[in-house]
Amino acid sequence: MIRDIRMLGDSVLREKAQPVPEITEELRALLPDMYDTMYAAEGVGLAAPQIGLGIRVIVIDPHDEVTAPFALFNPEVVATGSETEKSEEGCLSIPGIRELVERPTTCVVEALDPAGEPVHIEAEGFLARILQHEVDHLNGVLFLDHLSPIKRRMAIARWKKERAK
Ligand code: ZN
């Protein structure tokens, strides 16, 4: 079932999401909805707060040739590389706005998979970017927060203008 995506300005996007103490059937049952919602919006990742749930769950599909779609519970970025790169980024909660965001090109993420098994992911490039973006969501952080104050103000103004149409 496709859920409503919460938009910029919704307070749930600014709250720190809570870790999942245990991966229950109920939580696993949420994943098909998260995938449906991500694919319907043509996204490459979705975090639970984006559908109004303050829990640490993300789904990701980078649409490359080797990475199967996957879901993570309680993901944390435990390390990032020293090299950074600017690349265009958007967000399903801020549709229509894309900006160059500087991020580390590599990162290490630790999490639990839907079976409750620990996973350790060493990611680079686009996947590393998506992981950082989605874990940011769980900490109440949006990609706009990585922009300079002036660029952020301009992006928000443009978004408001788009929404008012
Ligand atoms: Zn986003």
Image (cartoon, rainbow, N blue to C red):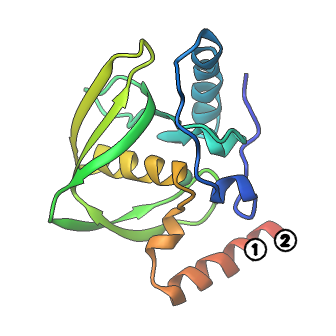
Could you say whether the residue bearing mark 2 is in a helix, strand or loop?
A: helix
47 above or below 65?
A: below
Q: Residue furthest front?
A: 21
Residue 95 in sight from this viewpoint: no
Q: Quadrant of the N terminus?
A: top right
The residue that appears at 47% across and 54% down in the rendered structure is 136
Q: Amino acid at mark 2?
A: Ala
The residue that appears at 69% across and 71% down in the rendered structure is 159
Q: CB of residue at label 2: within 8 Å of ligand 1?
A: no
Q: CB of residue at label 1: within 8 Å of ligand 1?
A: no
Q: Pinpoint residue 37: horizontal percent, then vertical percent.
A: 65, 32
The residue that appears at 41% across and 25% down in the rendered structure is 69
Report how many numbered discs are placed on residues in the image: 2
Q: Amino acid at mark 1?
A: Lys
**Which quarter of the picture shows residue 142?**
bottom right
**Crowding near pointer 2: few (<14 within 10 Å), some, many (20+)?**
few
Q: Pinpoint residue 42: horizontal percent, then vertical percent.
A: 56, 40
Q: In the image shown, does 151 or 64 lie closer to the viewer?
A: 151
Q: Pinpoint residue 62: horizontal percent, then vertical percent.
A: 38, 37
158 above or below 69?
A: below
Could you say whether the residue bearing mark 1 is in a helix, strand or loop?
A: helix
The residue to which callout 1 is attached is: 160
The residue to which callout 2 is attached is: 164
